[in-house]
Image: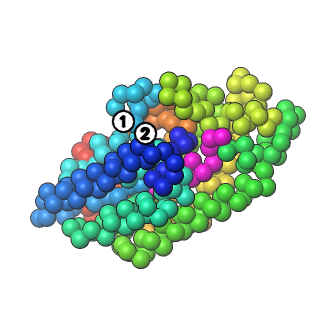
């Protein structure tokens, strides 16, 4: 979320090609895993995930070692035999995830004939809101103005674009894999600490805009509480959008609040630390187990 990925059809040349090649390799591995699946044991799930860095965070906290994200942690919590493809790319907004190129790859994954897909996991919206463009969603403010006055009129516009993306994903599911269930989430209440991934030149994604628009003067505890109230308001508005899309086949996984009120649960402004991602993954595991009670979903002891 917020990494500013150039996208497969954007600028970036070699980086763009690396993203495309990586996703194609993931899809090829998914198809091989389906070939190797025990056809006599239909109990484990077949899952396709896509989205942003909450599903694809190639760091451990802020350290360039290993991968800790919701999907990486979820793999350890699901039963042996589960086959899961992760097409998420850190930094992708919904317009990129569901744009033509990545949408077509997603369709190839969903329509393969080796085994029906049971669940689609989607993490989207964060990169439509956060980053340098975050200032567009904020009105001009001052230290004496209430946080409730912080949202600009165009925030509704970006919410509408994100909502359209979700509806487009639901329509795609209905058209190609109508029996699959969709699982989405609304992130958690981030702290605008001004902390990014300094060594990689990534972030911060929230504080600079809040400071630029006059809503925060520094990252003292009082100012953090003020900035977080604005972030909470935005995420609650986003949550209302998701709740409006929920149905028997579209499930909103309750991730808001899972990290509590401790800034130390976050590796940086946008991403939980490994324990935080593990807690988010546990919410997804519980949601999957609840919806597929007749299947073997969770790993023993998870």
Where residue 208 sits in the image (x, y, percent)?
A: 69, 33
Which of the 4 image quadrants contains residue 105?
A: bottom left
Q: Are marks 1 and 2 in contact (CB under 8 Å)?
A: yes
The segment highlighted magenta reads: 122-132
Where residue 243 sits in the image (x, y, percent)?
A: 58, 62
Q: In this view, does 158 lie to the left or right of 125?
A: right
Q: Is residue 21 placed above or below 39 in the rendered structure?
A: above
User: Per the image, is 29 magenta?
Assistant: no
Crowding at mark 2 (Cα within 10 Å: few <14, some 14-19, many 20+): many
Secondary-structure class at tag 2:
loop
Where residue 10 sits in the image (x, y, percent)?
A: 51, 52
Q: Is residue 247 placed above or below 236 in the rendered structure?
A: below
Q: Name the residue under label 2.
A: 57
User: Per the image, is 125 magenta?
Assistant: yes
Give the alpha-carbon distance from disc 1 to disc 2, as whole Å.
6 Å
Is residue 134 visible from the viewing direction of this image? yes
Quadrant in which the C terminus is drawn: top left
Q: Mark 1 points at which residue?
A: 67
Crowding at mark 1 (Cα within 10 Å: few <14, some 14-19, many 20+): some
Query: Is tag 1's residue or tag 2's residue first in the polypeptide sequence?
Result: 2
């Amino acid at each position: 979320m917020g990494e500013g990925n150039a996208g497969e059809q954007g600028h970036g040349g070699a980086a763009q090609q690396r993203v495309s090649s990586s996703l194609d390799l993931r899809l090829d591995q998914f198809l091989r895993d389906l070939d190797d699946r025990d056809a006599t044991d239909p109990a484990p799930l077949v899952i396709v995930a896509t989205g942003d860095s909450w599903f694809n965070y190639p760091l451990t906290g802020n350290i360039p070692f290993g991968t800790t994200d919701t999907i990486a942690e979820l793999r350890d919590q699901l039963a042996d035999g589960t086959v899961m493809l992760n097409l998420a790319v850190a930094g992708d907004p919904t317009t990129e995830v569901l744009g033509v190129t990545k949408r077509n790859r997603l369709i190839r994954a969903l329509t393969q004939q080796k085994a029906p897909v049971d669940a689609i996991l989607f993490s989207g919206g964060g990169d439509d809101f956060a980053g340098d463009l975050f200032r567009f969603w904020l009105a001009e403010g001052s230290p004496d103005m209430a946080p409730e006055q912080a949202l600009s009129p165009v925030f509704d516009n970006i919410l509408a674009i994100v909502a359209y993306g979700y509806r487009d994903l639901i329509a795609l599911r209905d058209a190609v894999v109508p029996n699959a269930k969709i699982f989405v989430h609304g992130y958690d209440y981030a702290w605008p600490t001004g902390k990014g991934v300094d060594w990689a030149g990534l972030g911060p994604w929230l504080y600079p805009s809040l400071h630029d628009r006059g809503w925060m003067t520094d990252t003292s505890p009082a100012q953090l509480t003020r900035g977080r109230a604005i972030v909470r308001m935005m995420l609650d508005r986003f949550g209302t959008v998701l709740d409006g899309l929920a149905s028997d086949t579209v499930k909103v996984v309750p991730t808001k609040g899972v990290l509590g009120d401790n800034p130390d649960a976050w590796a940086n402004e946008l991403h939980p630390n490994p324990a935080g991602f593990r807690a988010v993954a546990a919410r997804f595991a519980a949601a999957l187990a609840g919806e597929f009670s007749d299947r073997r979903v969770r790993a023993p002891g998870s």
